[in-house]
Amino acid sequence: MKSDRPFSIQARLKSFVYAFEGVIFFIRFETQATMHLIAIVAVLGAGYWFKICSMEWIAVVFAIGIVISAEMLNTAIEKLTDMVSPQINEQAKIVKDLAAGAVLIASLTAFIIGLIIFLPKIW
């Protein structure tokens, strides 16, 4: 689908501003963001301490990005669901549970990646 609007650098820059506002909102107002940031600092510190190789850094950074992205999408889905269905609703619960499940899968995957990278270095 082609847009009728011409390309605009200003519009592209605005979209980055909106995206960064979303990241700032997530960090400031979502408690799980604090837990994730603490885990990120610990993992990055461990990576530095154990001098992991480039491929291991790629896996770690990718895992971090996937978990944070999943958590932010989960937060967006929860907020949207609460907005469109403020009353208790079984379908809304299913939507929220599915989004939370995606975060769980991403987090477990990141955990397994961490085990694969760091366990041999610890032992």
Image (cartoon, rainbow, N blue to C red):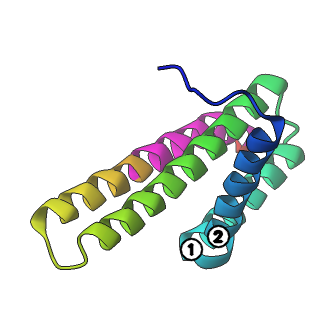
The residue tagged 2 is 25
In the rendered view, tell whether residue 6 sits above or below residue 90: above
Residue at the (56%, 48%) spot, across then down: 69
Whether residue 84 sits left or right of residue 58 in the image: it is left
> Is residue 98 in the magenta section?
no
What amino acid type is highlighted by mark number 1?
Glu
Residue at the (48%, 52%) spot, across then down: 73
Numbered label tally = 2
Residue 31 in which image quadrant? bottom right
Label 2 element class: helix
In the rendered view, tell whether residue 33 sits above or below residue 110: below
Magenta-tinted stretch:
104-121
Whether residue 63 sits left or right of residue 61 in the image: it is left
What amino acid type is highlighted by mark number 2?
Phe
Check whether the beta carbons of the residues at disc 2 and disc 1 lie within 8 A of each other: yes
Whether residue 74 sits left or right of residue 39 in the image: it is left
- Choose between 55 and 21: the one closer to the eye: 21
- Mark before the other along the chain sequence, 2 or 1: 2
The residue tagged 1 is 30
Label 1 element class: loop
- Residue 49: mark in rendering: none
Q: Position of residue 93 (x, y in %)?
A: 20, 65
Residue 39 visible to an observer of this rendering: no
